């Protein structure tokens, strides 16, 4: 099987089949980035198409001595951010069960105890709402880290900063998210006359 980088070179030589192969390899991760950032299936589809059109038109700018993945993911990230800024609106992001690794969740217990399932769903909803209050850059690193399960070095290549910078951003993003959640729980505790967490 040809590497992404070799496929990119074939596309530059006019090989349409190579472009289709590359699209098939990346359509899922591109859609995931778009969906998590935009919070809407149809917008994510549109952005995914826009990303692949951009890739096709700007492939001549790609440096084939570097990995292809970070280059195409950077285009996806930039397209999402650009779209969000144009619209200047709040978007909802579904994080599903990403904040709880699957191996830490005993599904048997969830089915046995509906209360645990309800609490898990409520926590997910609270996390989604809190994410909307985070700056774009924090939201993006959390999506890349916890939704796409990328390593910090990969995220650094995608957003064009050092790995250390990504480490700091993720740390700060998690801290900011935690602060928002604790504030909400504190206010909720006072409102319901319950002890705050």
Image: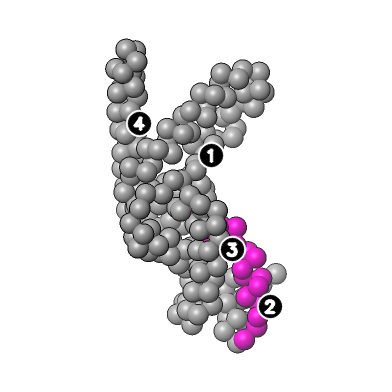
**Which residue is denoted by mark 1 in the rendering?**
96
Q: Nearer the viewer, mark 4 or mark 2?
A: 4
Q: Are marks 1 and 3 in contact (CB under 8 Å)?
A: no
Residue in the image at 57% along x and 73% along y: 5
* First in residue order: circle 3 vs circle 2: 2
Q: Which residues are magenta?
A: 14-33
Asked which secondary structure carries label 2, the reply is helix
Q: Is residue 112 visible?
A: yes
Q: Nearer the viewer, residue 103 or 33?
A: 33
* Labelled disc at residue 26: 3
Q: Are the residues flagged by discs 3 and 4 in contact, CB closer than 8 Å?
A: no
Q: CA distance from mark 1 to mark 2?
A: 35 Å
Image location (x, y in percent) of residue 90: 37, 49
Q: CA distance from mark 3 to mark 2?
A: 15 Å
Q: Earlier in the sequence, mark 4 or mark 2?
A: 2
Outermost residue, bottom direction?
Answer: 13
Marks 4/2: CA–CA distance: 48 Å
Which of 191/141 is in front? 191
The total number of labels drawn is 4
Sequence order check, earlier mark of 4 and 1: 1
Q: Is 64 colored magenta in this rendering?
A: no
Picture colour scheme: one colour
Read off the residue under disc 2. 17
Q: Which residue is mark 4?
A: 181
Q: Residues within 10 Å of mark 4 (few under 14, many from 20)?
A: some
Residues marked 3 and 2 touching at CB (< 8 Å): no
Residue 28 at what x, y percent from top left? 60, 57
Q: Secondary structure at mark 1?
A: loop
Kindly state the secondary structure of the residue where label 4 is placed.
helix
**C-alpha gap between disc 1 and disc 3:** 21 Å
């Amino acid at each position: 099987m040809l590497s992404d980088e070799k496929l990119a070179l074939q596309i530059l030589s006019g090989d349409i089949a190579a472009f289709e192969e590359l699209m098939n390899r990346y359509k899922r991760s591109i859609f995931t980035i778009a969906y998590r950032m935009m919070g809407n299936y149809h917008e994510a589809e549109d952005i995914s198409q826009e990303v692949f059109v951009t890739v096709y038109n700007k492939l001549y700018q790609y440096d084939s001595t570097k990995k292809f993945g970070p280059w195409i993911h950077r285009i996806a990230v930039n397209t999402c951010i650009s779209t969000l800024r144009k619209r200047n609106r709040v978007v909802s992001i579904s994080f599903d069960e990403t904040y709880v690794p699957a191996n830490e969740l005993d599904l048997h217990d969830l089915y046995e105890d509906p209360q645990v399932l309800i609490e898990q769903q409520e926590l997910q909803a609270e996390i989604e709402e809190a994410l909307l209050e985070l700056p774009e850059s924090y939201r993006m690193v959390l999506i890349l880290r916890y939704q796409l399960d990328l390593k910090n070095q990969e995220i650094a290549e995608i957003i064009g900063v050092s790995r250390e910078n990504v480490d700091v951003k993720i740390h700060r993003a998690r801290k900011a998210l935690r602060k928002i959640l604790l504030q909400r729980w504190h206010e909720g505790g006072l409102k319901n006359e319950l002890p705050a967490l």
